[in-house]
Image (tube, rainbow, N blue to C red):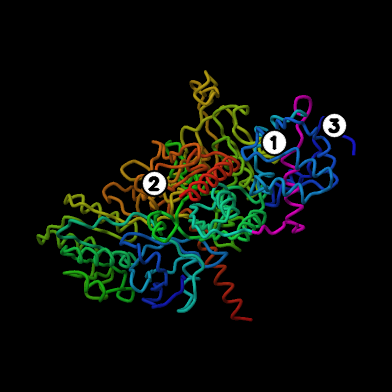
Amino acid sequence: MPKNMSLKKVPIPEQAPEVRNKNFEEVATGYTKEMALEEANRCLNCKNKPCMQGCPVQVHIPEFIEAITEQNFEKAYAIIKKTSSLPAVCGRVCPQESQCEKYCVRGIKGEAVAIGRLERFVADYCMNNNTEEKINIQKNGRKVAVLGAGPAGLTCAGDLAKAGFSVTVFEAFHKAGGVLVYGIPEFRLPKSIVQKEIDGLKELGVEIQTNMVVGKTVSIDELREEGYEAFFIGTGAGLPAFMNIPGENLNGVYSANEFLTRINLMKAYQFPKYDTPVYLGKRVAVVGGGNVAMDAARCAKRLGAEEVYIIYRRGEEEMPARLEEIHHAKEEGIIFKLLTNPVEVLGDDKGWVTGIRCVKMELGEPDASGRRRPQPKENSEFDIALENVIIAIGQTPNPLIKSTTEGLETQKWGGIITNEAGKTSLDGVYAGGDAVTGAATVILAMGAGKTAAKSIADYLLKK
Amino acid sequence: MNRIVRKKVLNEQVVLMEIDAPRIAKKAEPGQFIIFRIDEQGERIPLTIADYDREKGTVTIIFQIVGESTMRLSELNEGDTILDFVGPLGVASHLEGYKKVAVIGGGLGTAIAYPQAKKLTALGAEVHMITGFRNKELIILEEECKKVSAKAIVATDDGSNGTKGFVTDVLKKLIEEGNQYDLVIAIGPLVMMKFVSQLTKEYGIKTIVSMNPIMIDGTGMCGGCRVTVGGKTKFACVDGPDFDGHEVDFDQAILRQQTFKKYEQQAVQNHKCRLEGMADA
């Protein structure tokens, strides 16, 4: 097939905005075989593979795309799987525009090759057709404990299992998946896909124990006594940040974590079939500009809220959310209040939210993050009447393990301190993902899990 | 795992269950809680641990039937299992170093006050237990409380058991009679804990209350359980559930408790309808 020199990506079929903002089914339905072939032919198969340097887990991108052009999807999948443990997930939730696709040569004039969409196509095709070959693993009998079944922990567990270790993953929730199941909504990442990835790990021999809060139910020291020789801490950034403004404890104010967990993990969108409710009025404000904020806003819309606002103190340029999520949110009717910062949540005498008071902001000099620092404009206060406020301004690492593991060194703000290999201050204890970096992305957590798996294998095989 | 090894109906609203949960039993301390989820459709519901037996590997919970989940839990029987049972969560109560303690249980709170009294007595403190119920039909753990305290007084709002009055009346009387408590522990409805705390503040007696707000994960993740303590927001699941009663903003906690009332009632109604539907069939 000749190269496809179109400047535009092959569009991915999507549910229409006015339809999808009323259901929880996946927004993008994915490429067909024909679309994938057409898009794969846009790849120039550059010799120096610039795209690969943008990928935190170094997927061999031009090679897998070439396999697609040969219509050998199994081969493409095998190539991705060599370095990525959760391709169906990454194809959907990675911020490709700031990673692989950012470096794509086709992006210089026109749009980059749709690497994410192609990855998703390959993963879905192979999962649906059960083409994955069973890997023969030689077990070495050494036990490793992975704490937290999110992207970092699952990746680490998968790699260690493939290397022959007996891996047990301890998860505090009743379900494995971490942010993939409690945070990211069904319409962006179907839970059946996450489950398939987890089933794949189980087939590799990974054991998952749910309802195990390490630090409470069992400690690292006790696990050592039970024969675990090395540990990976991938407990994420679980502690929600609040703004510390008046009215934050009124009824109707949620952390994004609570709101999303009720909906995604506990399936409150199917109440009363599922027992967990979520209280939502007709007008909702979500504070924050990241993916979590977009997810919360779009969930609120789907639950029937008529006016849903995103309130963000900087401009759209500075928003940390994926471009696609911002675009989808706008299409679905989310109202963006940019350069706006809440100063107070307003309530009635019964303790319920009635509105939010905001100030207008303007951008000043760049701050430590390189983004221009927002400053309040004088006398710019205004109120928005609403029933719910959802706070999505970030999370910090969960302190449970730190407070129960003697000698584990952490940063002041709670992040676990590791070296480049993922090793903590304790012998045989490694860490990665949001527990180390603070809230970041799924793919960075996976990269950290991968690095730690290699370090753990080296450590144990030398021991 | 998570099998119900014993079930006892304490009164028409309150049920005791002893659950096979060796990992939790090994670690549990008074003041800590578990979270259960009955089945795939179930909510995650926190319950403070009422007792534990490290040797048998069991944890005892005592709960009041207030919503869908506790109603469904109450319908399970010995031999049945609960899908999820996780813990022990929260910070254990600090009970060391006290000489004379008044432990107060209001209604179902008695179930949580009981292990505290038991531990305090074991640590050598002189424990006076005051428990309060609306009427004598609702009294629970009367014998158990007697066994773990030097003095046990049961009061009823309507006086149907002979001692009429609120727990605050009894506590006030005991203090006025010259009992010098170095600690008061109050566990029960928010209103009760509020009034006990007001009373003890007048006398300058340190008071610990146990908060049991709405929560999901119980590990600090959702922030649904926030309570204002001393003007600061705290998470009951990881900072508590015990807090200084003189610092807790009870009025806010009482308002926050209403958040999901409407849904709770709807769920209970649905559940009843389903049951009746089944009976008809």
Q: Residue at 59% across / 73% down in the picture?
A: B274
Q: Is residue A37 left or right of residue A436?
A: right
Residue A280 visible in the picture: no
According to the image, label 2 marks what residue? A402
Q: Is residue A23 magenta?
A: no
Reply above or below: A61 against B21.
Answer: above
Could you say where residue A153 lies in the image, as x and y percent from the top left?
Answer: 54, 50
Asked whether A137 or A94 is in front, the reply is A137
**Residue at the spot x=74%, y=51% of the render?**
A124
Instruction: For residue B208, say whether it is visible.
Output: yes
* Magenta-tinted stretch: A107-136
Q: Nearer the viewer, mark 3 or mark 1?
A: 3
N-terminal of the pair, mark 2 or mark 3, is 3
Q: Is residue B30 left or right of residue A77?
A: left
Q: Is residue A83 above or below residue A270?
A: above
Rendering quarter of residue A316: top right
Chain of residue at mark 3: A
State which quarter of the image contains the N terminus of chain A.
top right
As for residue A126 lying within the magenta part, the answer is: yes
Name the residue tied to disc 1. A327
Sequence-wise, which precedes: disc 2 or disc 1? 1
Residue at the limit of the structure toward the left, as seen here:
B178
- Residue B22 tag number: none
Residue located 54% across and 37% down the image: A287
The residue identified by callout 3 is A6
- The amino acid on which the numbered mark 3 sits, given as a three-letter code, is Ser
Amino acid on which the number 2 mark rests in the picture = Lys
The residue at the far front in this view is A462
